[in-house]
Amino acid sequence: MVGNLYIIEKARLDDLIRLLREDGCRVVGPTIRDGAIVFDEIASAEQLPRGWTDVQEAGHYRLERRTDDAYFGYVVGPYSCKRYLFPPRQRLFSITRNGRPLSGFDVDVTSASPPRIAFLGVRACDLAALEIQDRVFNAEYADPYYRDVRRSAVLIAVNCSEPGGTCFCSSMQTGPRCTRLFDLALTELPAAFAAEAGTERGRALLERLSPQPADRNVQHLVELMLESAAEHMGRALDTRELPEILLQNPEHPHWNRVAERCLACANCTLSCPTCFCSNVEDSTDLGGSRAERWRSWGSCFTLEFSYHTGGFSRSSVRARYRQWLTHKLAGWHEQFGMSGCVGCGRCITWCPVGIDVTKEATTIADDVRRADVAERGARERSR
């Protein structure tokens, strides 16, 4: 059954959620809150954003009614799986005076038991982001909390058939088709779901939903839907030689033009599913008997992030934006062997001034490419 395509009725979606909850999972899926489609804990299919879609552009996000009752007729909201695997704020340990003469302190490194989470509605770009986060938090020196939640997590993915205005996952080779990491991948059709198991765990779950083998017509329809989605992305990014171009042009004048618009608000890094920077804060009670250490999300856009003995290494907004974009699209290749961008478009949508990472990188790259062509032409004419 793994790797083959099956059909399950839409009415079985509620059964899927129920089965996951019966298996001890906390089901986290898309739901509407505060005018956006966000990941949150759900108990039934009634909480899904059925019949809603999101309209996204640079600095713009709005919900609109669809003309059908699709459950997953949207793209991505501001949250990703990162919020649950790498919490925005987390206690690392506490120290308490115990009054004993020899030891003096009790150190508590225990945290709340990691929940078993079933993620419902994960898109291909976010699966690619998980793969990146695995290299950060689940490698040789694993983060215990991330490792435990990730190990037990169930991933129910959904293939994208309608990309959004800021999507460019096809440029980054991360979507719209889910190709790895998922336990079960769904493609929403008008009257049913096409389902594919990616693991034995997904196969066992699919069997409990009484699926029917998909015929060739359904398989062909799914292929056409995903091919059409790949051809109709809202954005595109030419990644040819892009890492080298960005790394070799730190003084390009376009960095100044972007800095004039950037607010250094860190929205892009907070909504990004791959950014992993954090701060560590220590606090004590007024009596001096207890201290705690907390980890919270950080951002390379804050001035304090680059502080070291002697001052700040990136004191200007220009330097901080350049650091983020160059690390994301270039330095990440040296660090992890892959791009740090998965083409989800969140940084474009949730930037309050509408800075578009695809346009900024393309402006620099095209300018450098034109200069190279002109230089080669001049050399040939001089021969």
Image: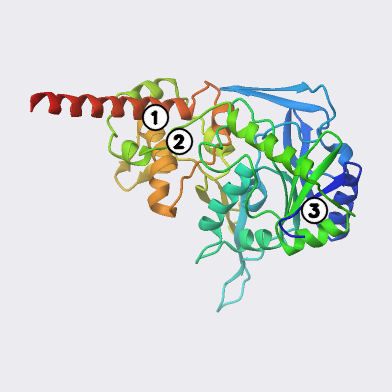
Q: Quadrant of residue 42?
A: top right
Q: Is residue 375 above or below residue 154?
A: above
Q: Earlier in the sequence, mark 3 or mark 1?
A: 3
Q: Nearer the viewer, residue 273 or 378?
A: 378
Q: Residue furthest front?
A: 216
Looking at the rendered structure, the kind of residue marked 2 is: Phe
Looking at the rendered structure, the kind of residue marked 1 is: Val
Provide residue 280's location: percent of width, then percent of height. Answer: 52, 51
Give the distance between the C-alpha atoms of the residues marked 3 and 1, in whole angstroms: 40 Å
Provide residue 4's location: percent of width, then percent of height. Answer: 74, 55
Say left or right for 138 vs 77. Answer: left
Q: Residue furthest left?
A: 383
Q: Secondary structure at mark 2?
A: loop
Say left or right for 259 vs 133. Answer: left
Residue 156 - label: none
Looking at the rendered structure, the kind of residue marked 3 is: Arg
Residue 301 - label: 2
Q: Quadrant of residue 345?
A: top right
User: Quadrant of the image for the C terminus?
Assistant: top left
Q: Nearer the viewer, residue 94 or 123?
A: 123
Q: Is residue 13 above or below residue 142?
A: above
Q: Secondary structure at mark 3?
A: strand
Q: Secondary structure at mark 1?
A: helix
Q: Earlier in the sequence, mark 3 or mark 2?
A: 3
Q: Are marks 2 and 1 in contact (CB under 8 Å)?
A: yes
Q: Earlier in the sequence, mark 2 or mark 1?
A: 2
Provide residue 381's location: percent of width, then percent of height. Answer: 12, 23
Residue 26 - label: 3
Q: Which of the two discs, 3 and 1, sits closer to the camera?
A: 3
Q: Which residue is mark 1?
A: 317
